Structures are given as C-alpha cells and as structure tokens.
C-alpha cells in the first residue's frame, strides 16, 4: 500500500514537473511578437486544460518506460536525453525548417527558439525521470536488445522507407480529408485522389529526402528506447506506441500557426500514425532476436 502511494505521488510529481518545464522555457525564450499577434484568444482558453492532458499522457508514457528498464541511473539519463532530443527538439527543428518556411508564417529566428525551448524542457524532464528511477537490481540488462552496426543500419533504412509510406497514408486519409486543412495548405478545397497526391509528393526530391531522414531519426530514437526496455515484446510495443504517440499529441495544444480545425486534423493524423509506427519500430528491431547471430 505504502509503495503504491509513493509511486502515485511520484507520478503526479512527474506531471507537475513536466508542466513547469513546458511553460518555463517560453518565459526564458519568449515567442516573437509576430507570432503572438496570430494567437486566437478564444482558443487559448483551452490551453491549460489541454496542456494538463498532454502532460498526463507524456508523463504516464515515460513512467511506464522507466518502470520497465533495469539500467544504471546514468545510462537511463543519457539514453532518455538522447532519445527525447531526437524525438522532440531535433524533429521540431526539422519540421520548422521544412514546413513553416514554406508556409511563411514564422520568422526564421523563431526556429532556433523552438529548438531551444524543447531542448530545455526534455533535457530537464529526462533528468527528473532519472532521479526518480530506481534500479531493481545491480545487473545492468541491455545486452539482449543491442544490434550490431550493420544490422542496425539496415533496419533504420527500412524504417525510413516505412515512415514515408505511413506519413503519406495517414496524411491523405486523415488530415487531408479535412476541408480546412486543404484550404490552409493549397488555398482550395479540392480533394485530389490519393495516387495524384502521393505522385506529387514523391516527385519532389526534397520531400522524399527530408521524410526519409525523419523516419531514420524516429527509428534511431526508437532504437534507444528499445535498448532501455526489459519486458515482453507486447509491452515494449505498447510503451513505444505511447511514447511516439506523444509526438503527435502535442499538436492539440493551441498555437499561432495552425487554425483550430487544421490543428485537430494533424492531431488525429499524427497521433494515430505515430502510435502504429511505434509498434512497427519495436517489431522491426525485435524481429528474429533469438534467431539472429547479428545481436550482441
């Protein structure tokens, strides 16, 4: 009973710390005036309730992660910091440069601000999780989840290709089905066929290269999480699905870039696609683990 109570209090503290760490960087590194002028005051009334929901989701996802690992505190911190860096600050920067630059809604100097806000949030969040983490025994168990370099590269390349497919599939059949989203990006409500849209996307070398690299970065982040986990394959898939789903969940927060319906469409699209993608990533890394001599 006492142990469960302590665990519950710690989880609540993780939620509160995450909220604090999410807000504080914006105070330290303020949003530019041009973006503040785009904020919809009505939508911002929901910011804190949605932030609480987002914090609960993220905190529980990472709480499950640290409850299902058995490595040293230092190793847990280094891996958490590296994986979250790839998943949030670096990916946020890549998305900012690729999408926001083309939309012309954000000043270029805001890209660095977005990066450093996320960096501060998730490096300190990783540190706090590491402080709460308690190793179950003195044996550091991550050897069974390590791939040799050649096999890792092969599987990361495969994940990069799979990500492009998932991105286009969910992008069209979820986000692009919202009229507001089509108007926001193209200025017209016309709904072209899936094959027309995917042909347009894949005919753009920049689009293919950027999203292939994004898939590899997501995969590398997933591999780091994978090496931390010490549980059944099914549980691994659930945990990584939740963690990757958090990348999409953040889009629900009101922001000055996306109008409400566009934001909702991307929230549904990205959260669902990344949950499925997280499961696929674990399956790929764990496939043949007991049969392949490529594992060390």
Image (cartoon, helix red, strand yellow):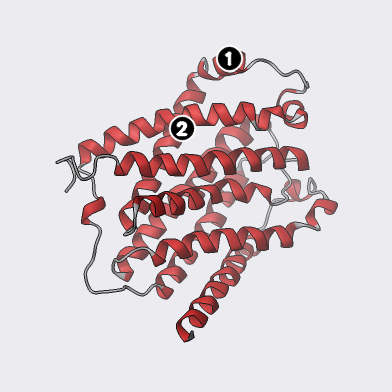
Say which mark, if any, is on residue 260: none
Residue 245: x and y in percent read 54, 48
Residue at horizontal 74%, vertical 50%? 33
Classed neighbour count for the residue bearing mark 1: other residues with Cα under 10 Å, few (<14), some (14–19), many (≥20): few
Q: Quadrant of residue 73?
A: bottom left
Classed neighbour count for the residue bearing mark 2: other residues with Cα under 10 Å, few (<14), some (14–19), many (≥20): many
Q: Secondary structure at mark 1?
A: helix
155 in relation to 112, above or below: above
**Is residue 187 in view?**
yes
Residue at horizontal 62%, vertical 37%? 269
Q: Quadrant of residue 108?
A: top right
**Is residue 89 in view?**
no
Mark 2 highlights which residue? 163
Residue at horizontal 51%, vertical 52%? 242
Residue 191: x and y in percent read 72, 19
Residue 151: x and y in percent read 23, 37
CA gap, disc 2 and disc 1: 17 Å
**Residue farthest along the bottom direction in this orientation:** 2
**288 relative to 66 in the view: left or right:** left
Between 45 and 112, the residue placed more toward the observer is: 45
Q: Secondary structure at mark 2?
A: helix
The first of marks 2 and 1 along the sequence is 2
The mark tally for this picture is 2
**280 relative to 152 in the view: left or right:** right
Mark 1 highlights which residue? 195
């Amino acid at each position: 009973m006492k142990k469960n109570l302590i665990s519950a209090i710690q989880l609540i503290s993780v939620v509160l710390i995450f909220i604090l760490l999410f807000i504080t960087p914006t105070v330290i590194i303020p949003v530019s005036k041009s973006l503040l002028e785009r904020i919809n005051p009505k939508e911002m009334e929901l910011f804190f309730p949605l932030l609480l929901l987002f914090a609960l989701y993220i905190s529980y996802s990472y709480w499950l992660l640290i409850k299902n690992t058995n490595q040293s505190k230092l190793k847990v911190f280094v891996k958490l910091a590296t994986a979250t860096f790839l998943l949030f600050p670096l990916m946020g920067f890549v998305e900012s440069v690729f999408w926001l630059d083309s939309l012309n809604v954000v000043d270029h100097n805001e890209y660095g601000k977005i990066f450093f806000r996320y960096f501060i949030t998730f490096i300190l969040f990783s540190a706090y999780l590491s402080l709460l983490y308690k190793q179950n025994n003195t044996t550091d168990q991550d050897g069974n989840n390590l791939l040799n370099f050649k096999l890792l590269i092969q599987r990361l390349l495969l994940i990069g290709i799979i990500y492009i497919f998932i991105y286009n599939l969910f992008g069209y059949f979820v986000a692009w089905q919202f009229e507001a989203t089509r108007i926001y990006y193209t200025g017209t409500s016309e709904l072209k066929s899936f094959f027309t849209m995917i042909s347009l996307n894949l005919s753009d070398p920049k689009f293919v290269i950027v999203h292939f690299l994004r898939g590899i970065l997501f995969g590398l982040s997933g591999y780091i999480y994978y090496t931390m986990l010490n549980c059944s394959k099914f549980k691994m898939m659930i945990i990584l699905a939740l963690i990757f789903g958090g990348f999409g969940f953040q889009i629900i927060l009101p922001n000055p870039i996306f109008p409400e319906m566009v934001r909702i469409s991307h929230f549904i699209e990205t959260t669902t696609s990344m949950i499925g993608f997280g499961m696929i990533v674990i399956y790929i890394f764990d496939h043949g683990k007991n049969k392949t001599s490529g594992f060390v």
